[in-house]
Amino acid sequence: MNLWFGIYELLTGVDHLVLDYYRFHPTPEWIIWLLDEALSSASWFLFLLFIFTILNGRKNWLFWAAVSTQVVTILGQLALRMGWIGLVQFDLIWALALVFYFCYILGLLYRKAARGVPDAQLMLIPVALCYVGWLAVILLTALGRSGHTWVYRDLHWFFEISRRPFPFSVNDIADMVMLVAVVAVLPLRFARSRRDEERLAGEMESARTVQQVLIPNEIPPVPGFAIHCVYRPAGQVGGDFFQVIPVGSGGALIAVGDVSGKGMPAAMTVSLLVGTFRTLAHYTHRPSEILGSMNRRMLSRSQGGFTTCVVLRIEPQGTVIVANAGHLAPYLAGQEIKVENGLPLGITGETDYPEVSIQLPVGAQLTLYTDGVIEARARSGELFGFERGAALSNQPAEVIAQTAQSFGQDDDITVLTVTLEASALASEAQPGLSWSATPVLERHGIP
C-alpha cells in the first residue's frame, strides 16, 4: 500500500522534471512524449492501486474500466501524433476515459466513507475537488481550442491565479489539498495499525497464559503406566490439546485433539474443549459418552470450524478403550490400530462414537499424534507422511516431535506415548495363570 503511493509520487516527480528539462534543453519531441506518457500513465495507475488497496476495493467492471483509462489515453495520444485526430478530439477522448477512472475512485471513497471508514472520510472531499478540477481544465481547454476564446479571457483565473512568486492555478491548489489529505492518511493509518497490533499482542499473550494453564507442563503420575507428551505449537498459541486425568479406580482418561484453524479462535476453542473434558471426567469415564457431550457443546460454538479428537480410557491391567472423532488412529507396536471413526466434533449432532477395546502388552508403546507430525513439510514440498509416522511411532515422544519439527514444522505438533509397565500386572497375577497379549493383538490385526 505505502509502496504504491511512494512509487506514484516518485514517477509524478520524475515526469515533471522531464517536462521542465524539455523547456530549457532542446530535445527530440518524440522522446519527451514517450517518457511523459509512460511516466504519467504509470503514476495514474499506481494511484488507482493505492486507493484500491487501502480501501479493500472490489474488481468489478468499473475497476477494469478505470484500469483501461490509461490504455485509451495512450492510444489517443498515438492517434494525435499520427494526425488521425485533432487536439479537441483528443481532449474529449481523454475526458471521457477519465470519467470512468474518477467514478470508480470517488464511488469507492463515498461507499467506504458512508460506512464510517476514516481514511475514506478524510480523502473523499479533497480527491473529489481535485478530480473535478482536472475534468474542468480538460473540458475548458477543449472549448478554448475549438474557437471559444472567451474561455481563456473570462476564466483565466481558473487556469492561473497568479504568476508570483511562481505560477499556480485552482487546479494546483486542489492537487495540493488532495496530496495533503492522502499523506495525512498514512501516519493515521500507521497509528491505528500500531494500536491494533498492540491490542492483538495483548490478547495473544492472555490466550497463551490461559493455554499454559490448561495444557499441562507435567503429566500427572498414573500408577503402572509411563506416559510422556511433547507439545510444540507452531505459533504463540496452538490449536492442539491433550489431557491426562487419573481416575480413582486406577488408570486414566486421555484426550488428544486438534482444532481447525489457528491463532486466537483456535486457542479459545481449545479452552472450551479442555474445560468440557475436565468437567465430563467427573461424571463418566466412557470415551464414547465424553466425545458425544463434547460434540454437542461444540455444535453451538464451532462457527463453521471443527475439531478432531481421540479419547482413551486406560485401565490398570492394560486394557485400552478408544473412541475416535475423526482423529489420527493411535499406533501400537509400530502399526496403526483399526478403530471406527465418528465425524469430527462440531459438524453434526447425528453421529456416534463407537468404542474399541484393545490390550496393551507390557513394554509396548501406544502412540498418539496430531496431524502436525504427518503433515510436516520439507522445503521441497514433500510431506512427512504416514509411512514415516508409522515407522517412527515406537520412538520416544521427544524424538518423534523433534524429527517432525526438523523435517519442516507447518502446524502444531503433539505426540503422546503410553507404556504399560511390568509392575502394573505383577500385582494382578495369580498363581498358576499366565497372561499373553498375542491373541488380543491378532484380533485387532496386529501380529
Image (cartoon, rainbow, N blue to C red):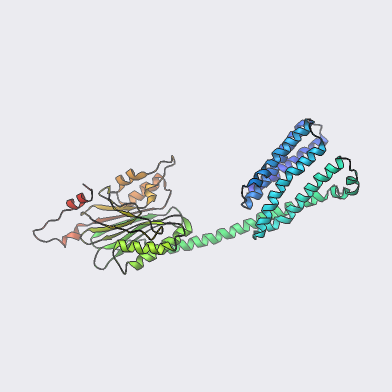
Residue 95 x/y as whole percent:
77, 43
User: Which quadrant holds residue 275?
Assistant: bottom left
Q: Is residue 274 left or right of residue 222?
A: right
Residue 334 x/y as whole percent:
27, 47
The one nearer the camera, 158 or 423, is: 158
The one nearer the camera, 219 or 120, is: 120
Task: Indicate whether 302 appears above or below 172.
Answer: below
User: Measuring 31% from the left and 56% from the top, which residue is drawn there?
Assistant: 228
Residue 373 x/y as whole percent:
37, 49
Residue 442 x/y as whole percent:
20, 49
Find the residue positioned furthest to the left. Answer: 432
User: Measuring 44% from the left and 52% from the top, which residue is drawn there?
Assistant: 234
User: Measuring 83% from the left and 43% from the top, which residue is drawn there?
Assistant: 141
User: Measuring 42% from the left and 51% from the top, which residue is drawn there?
Assistant: 411
The one nearer the camera, 69 or 217, is: 69
Q: Is residue 228 left or right of residue 81?
A: left
**Residue 330 visible to the viewer:** yes
